[in-house]
């Protein structure tokens, strides 16, 4: 009882101290927060300060009577919902009727009977609690509905990506393999088609892997495994399959990574981060551009990794949109390359696991720089 009532505020309004004393004696063992007022003006001032859950209001008071107090309460949007129980004499039936008309929820008759007083008070407080529970439940349902709508929206976008953006690369692979199988090509053309097939397979694989990682992240199925990682070797291994894609656009990739740097992180997650940043840079850099990857030790515990390109750049609004979670609309690259729209979301999420954030600086038409920090692996850890 104490825990349930300890935050419940009740205002008692009566000009008769004896009546107040009786009501307080009834309520004192129920651990309510009790406030008192001895006239109408004082009652309105108390309501503004205390904001009670329930008001017991005497009708017959000098100056401003209980009816006038109730009218004032019900005309104020901030107090109109506070339930009012009127206190009236047994014979004042016309007062009871008028009290209900003005918005009162119940009445207590004088002289007081403890069981009646407590039953009427508890009835109103129970209704208040039920209303609060319903409001909380309604809020939870609205949140759940919103989450469900977002999940359905993401599912539809995911199916669109799978059915549309992956369809092209896989269809291209199918056509290339048929040309190779027909054996109507010389050795040079055959090798060129095999190279094209390999690149299409890699592109489709990267897109599919992004989607699978994103789907897992939505179900909280990705676990973080921290280990020592040779930064230079890891970056070299990650960008190696991307070099042919850059070469197709005459894009030069340069790296300047300290060969003696080891970081603490999840190898799979960092692969996804670096690969997405490099593949995005290739995608949005015009033919003949440059992409530079470099690292710099910021302090004895931190290294900063930067991926800078000479691509089309981003506006401030586009950058803000990239930080929003979920599936984004995939923009076509400078040579109509496709994507999934989840790459940078994965980068941001996976860097969070590393205690880092993805920083983006860009100038439209000039290029972009994506950077993040990682913890250095310290051998005494």
Image (cartoon, rainbow, N blue to C red):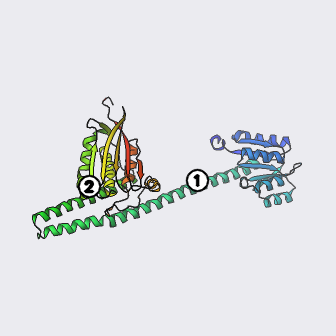
Q: Nearer the viewer, residue 169 or 12?
A: 169
Quarter of the picture holding the C terminus: top left
Q: Which mark is residue 105?
A: none
Kindly report which numbered mark, 2 or 1, lies closer to the viewer in this rendering. Answer: 2
Compute the Cα span from label 2 to label 1: 54 Å
Labelled disc at residue 136: 1
Q: Position of residue 308 (x, y in %)?
A: 34, 48
Q: Quadrant of residue 164?
A: bottom left
Q: Position of residue 19 (x, y in %)?
A: 83, 43
Say whether residue 132 is left or right of residue 189. Answer: right
Residue placed farthest to the right in the image? 62
Q: Is residue 115 visible?
A: no
The residue located at (20%, 62%) in the rendering is: 196
Nearest the camera: 215 or 1? 215
- Residue 324 or residue 83, whichever sits in front: 324
Above or below, 27 against 142 in this view is above
Q: Could you say which quadrant of the image residue 34 lies in?
A: top right
Q: Position of residue 127 (x, y in %)?
A: 67, 54
User: Which residue was labeled with disc 2?
Assistant: 246
- Which quadrant is home to the N terminus? top right
| Comes first in the chain, label 2 or label 1 | 1
Q: Is residue 221 above or below residue 180?
A: above
């Amino acid at each position: 009882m104490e825990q349930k009532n300890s935050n419940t505020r009740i205002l008692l309004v009566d000009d008769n101290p004896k009546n107040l004393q009786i009501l307080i004696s009834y309520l004192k063992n129920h651990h309510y927060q009790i406030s008192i007022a001895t006239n109408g003006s004082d009652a309105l001032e108390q309501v503004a300060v205390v904001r009670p859950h329930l008001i017991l209001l005497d009708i017959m008071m000098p100056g401003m009577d209980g009816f006038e107090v109730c009218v004032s309460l019900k005309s104020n949007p901030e107090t109109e919902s506070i339930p009012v129980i009127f206190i009236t004499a047994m014979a004042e039936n016309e007062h009871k009727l008028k009290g209900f008309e003005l918005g009162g929820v119940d009445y207590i008759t004088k002289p007081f009977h403890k069981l009646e007083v407590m039953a009427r008070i508890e009835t109103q407080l129970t209704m208040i609690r039920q209303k609060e529970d319903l409001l909380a439940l309604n809020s939870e349902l609205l949140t759940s509905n919103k989450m469900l709508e977002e999940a359905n929206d993401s599912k539809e976008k995911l199916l669109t990506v799978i059915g549309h953006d992956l369809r092209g690369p896989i269809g291209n692979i199918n056509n290339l393999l048929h040309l190779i199988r027909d054996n109507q090509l010389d050795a040079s053309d055959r090798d060129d088609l095999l190279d094209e097939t390999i690149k299409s397979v890699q592109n489709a694989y990267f897109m599919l892997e992004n989607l699978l990682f994103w789907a897992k992240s939505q179900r909280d199925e990705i676990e973080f495994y921290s280990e020592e990682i040779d930064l230079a070797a890891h970056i070299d291994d990650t960008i190696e399959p991307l070099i042919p894609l850059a070469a197709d656009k005459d894009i030069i990739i340069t790296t300047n990574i300290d060969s003696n740097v080891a970081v603490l992180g999840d190898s799979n997650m960092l692969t996804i981060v670096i690969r997405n940043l490099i593949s995005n840079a290739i995608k949005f850099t015009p033919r003949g551009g440059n992409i530079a990857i470099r690292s710099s030790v910021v302090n004895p515990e931190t290294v900063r990794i930067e991926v800078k390109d000479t691509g089309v750049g981003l506006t401030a609004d586009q950058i803000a949109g990239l930080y929003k979670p979920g599936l984004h609309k995939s923009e076509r690259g400078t040579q109509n390359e496709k994507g999934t729209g989840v790459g940078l979301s994965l980068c941001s999420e996976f860097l969070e696991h590393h205690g880092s954030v993805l920083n983006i600086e860009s100038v439209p038409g000039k290029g972009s720089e994506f950077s993040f920090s990682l913890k250095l692996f310290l051998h005494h850890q």
